[in-house]
Image: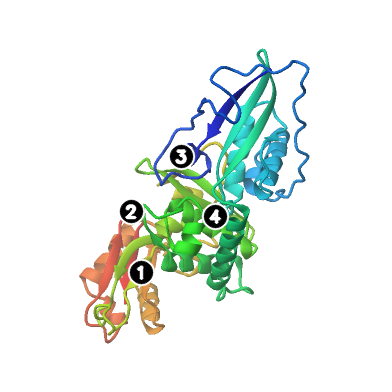
């Protein structure tokens, strides 16, 4: 009997719903290398009569999770074994498959469905064989911290998550809950490319600095605490970079949420504010709602999910931010648009974002309200206007 050792690295996992190495694309690699703990450079010959360990009989606790449902029966067993090994810090577990591809597929599904495995760095596995016949696969999770350290950090994460959710509308709709999470994460967590632990939720709940993977995992973590089904999706965006976002179920329908792209990184002051020097109001972070409750048609204009796990067709619009909030304009109505803007001003909103069904409507609104100054017909007392243009998504934003 001989054995071969392989390693699934964090960077390799970026393409497959795993721990992203930043938001850059990486290829999945299998690394054959000797390890003094398990083998030398030459294959180790094992006695033919030696029987491999039996696969772990792990109970399934993931029946409702999205990626789990995309697996075949054999892969589901491996998925259950991996979850058990990660949660119980098990090592050297024989899994219920002889296929490395099925094992890796199950592993990727776990990392899509489980956003809280911050202590798991990567997974190595050994293939045992007799001649050309594979007899078993044994996996060894590699942990970044001790059980005691894991418990301490989990306590910090739970305390911060509880604080973040202290104002959540627990009796509200799924839309209300998800919007609260989206806005809270964007306002409280900054996008920092080289932030520490940015492939897991430590970066969000302990450091408040992260990148796309951290935002996606944190969104999933908070939504699941509010009872909203959610999984993390990995794919590429228009510039070819690897990116992570979320698939969620809101009020019984599938939608996409991209918290990272909702954080526009744009900070502004209104015209009455001074510098943040102890006088006047603090600067405000602009939130982009174009990535909340997105449909497949709208999101795939810029996002391409990795094909490893098929995505459902997200066609519902009731919980799209603009539709739900009455900010979607599909026919020209100057009074309706003007009233939306004036209501936002009177209600003390930071800004009003209006999405138009097509470019022609968008340009007509821009011309009428901004270039021809009809905005002031609806907003008495305003002497000048700050606004943002988004010609790609046909969104006009008025800043107050």
Q: Is 65 left, or right, of 287 in this rendering?
A: right
Cα distance, mark 3 to mark 4?
A: 28 Å
What label does residue 11 carry, if any? 3
The residue mark sitting in front, 2 or 4, is: 4
Q: Is residue 369 left or right of residue 210?
A: left
Relative depth, front residue between 208 and 75: 208
Q: Residues within 10 Å of mark 4 (few under 14, many from 20)?
A: many
CA–CA distance between discs 2 and 3?
32 Å
- Badge 3: few (under 14), some or many (20 or more) residues near its Cα, within 10 Å? many
Image quadrant where one finds the N terminus = top right
Residue at the spot 54% in from the left edge and 32% down from the top edge: 7
Q: Earlier in the sequence, mark 3 or mark 4?
A: 3
Image coordinates for residue 222, horizontal then vertical, percent? 57, 63
Which label's residue is closer to the chain start, 2 or 1? 1
Q: What secondary structure is found at the residue carrying circle 1?
A: strand
Q: Nearer the viewer, mark 3 or mark 4?
A: 3
Which of the numbered marks, if any, corresponds to residue 255?
4
> How far is the residue under mark 1 from the one under mark 3?
31 Å
Q: Which residue is mark 2?
A: 392
Residue furthest toward the bottom? 381
**Residue denoted by label 1:** 285
The quarter of the picture where residue 350 lies is: bottom left
Q: Position of residue 299 (x, y in %)?
A: 45, 50
Residue found farthest to the top? 131
Task: Give the residue at x 44% y 63%.
Answer: 208
How far across and how far down the image is residue 314, in percent? 55, 50
Residue neighbourhood size for the residue with mark 1, other residues' Cα within 10 Å, grouped as few (<14), some (14–19), many (≥20): some
């Amino acid at each position: 009997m001989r054995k071969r050792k392989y390693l699934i690295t964090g960077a390799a996992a970026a393409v497959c719903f795993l721990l992203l190495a930043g938001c850059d694309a990486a290829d999945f690699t299998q690394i054959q290398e000797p390890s003094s703990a398990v083998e030398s450079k030459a294959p180790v010959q094992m006695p033919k009569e030696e029987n491999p360990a039996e696969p772990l009989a792990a109970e399934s606790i993931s029946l409702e999770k999205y990626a789990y449902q995309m697996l075949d029966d054999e892969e589901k067993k491996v998925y259950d074994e991996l979850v058990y090994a990660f949660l119980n810090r098990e090592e050297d577990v024989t899994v219920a498959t002889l296929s490395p591809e099925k094992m890796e597929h199950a592993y990727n599904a776990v990392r899509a469905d489980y956003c809280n495995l911050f202590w798991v760095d990567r997974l190595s596995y050994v293939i045992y064989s007799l001649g050309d016949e594979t007899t078993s696969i044994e996996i060894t999770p590699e942990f970044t911290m001790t059980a005691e350290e894991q418990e301490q950090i989990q306590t910090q994460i739970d305390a911060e998550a509880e604080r973040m959710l202290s104002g959540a509308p627990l009796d509200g709709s799924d839309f209300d809950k998800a919007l609260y999470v989206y806005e809270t994460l964007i306002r409280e967590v900054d996008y920092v490319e080289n932030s520490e632990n940015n492939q897991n939720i430590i970066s969000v709940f302990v450091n408040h600095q992260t990148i796309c993977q951290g935002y996606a995992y944190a969104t999933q973590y908070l939504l699941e605490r509010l009872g909203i089904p959610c999984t993390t999706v990995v794919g590429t965006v228009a510039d070819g970079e690897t990116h992570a976002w979320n698939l969620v179920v809101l009020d019984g329908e599938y939608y996409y949420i991209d918290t990272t792209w909702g954080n526009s990184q744009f900070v502004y002051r209104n015209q009455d504010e001074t510098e943040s020097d102890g006088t006047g109001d603090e600067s405000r972070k602009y939130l982009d709602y174009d990535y909340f409750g997105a449909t497949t048609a709208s999101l795939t204009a810029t996002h391409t999910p990795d094909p490893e796990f098929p995505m459902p067709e997200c066609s519902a619009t009731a919980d799209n931010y603009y539709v739900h909030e009455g900010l979607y304009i599909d026919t020209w109505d100057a009074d309706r648009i003007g009233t939306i803007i004036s209501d936002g001003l009177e209600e003390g909103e930071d800004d009003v974002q209006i999405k138009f069904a097509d470019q022609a409507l968008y340009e007509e609104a821009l011309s009428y309200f901004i270039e021809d100054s009809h905005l002031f017909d609806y907003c008495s007392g305003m002497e000048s206007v700050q606004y943002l243009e988004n010609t790609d998504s046909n969104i006009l934003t008025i800043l107050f």
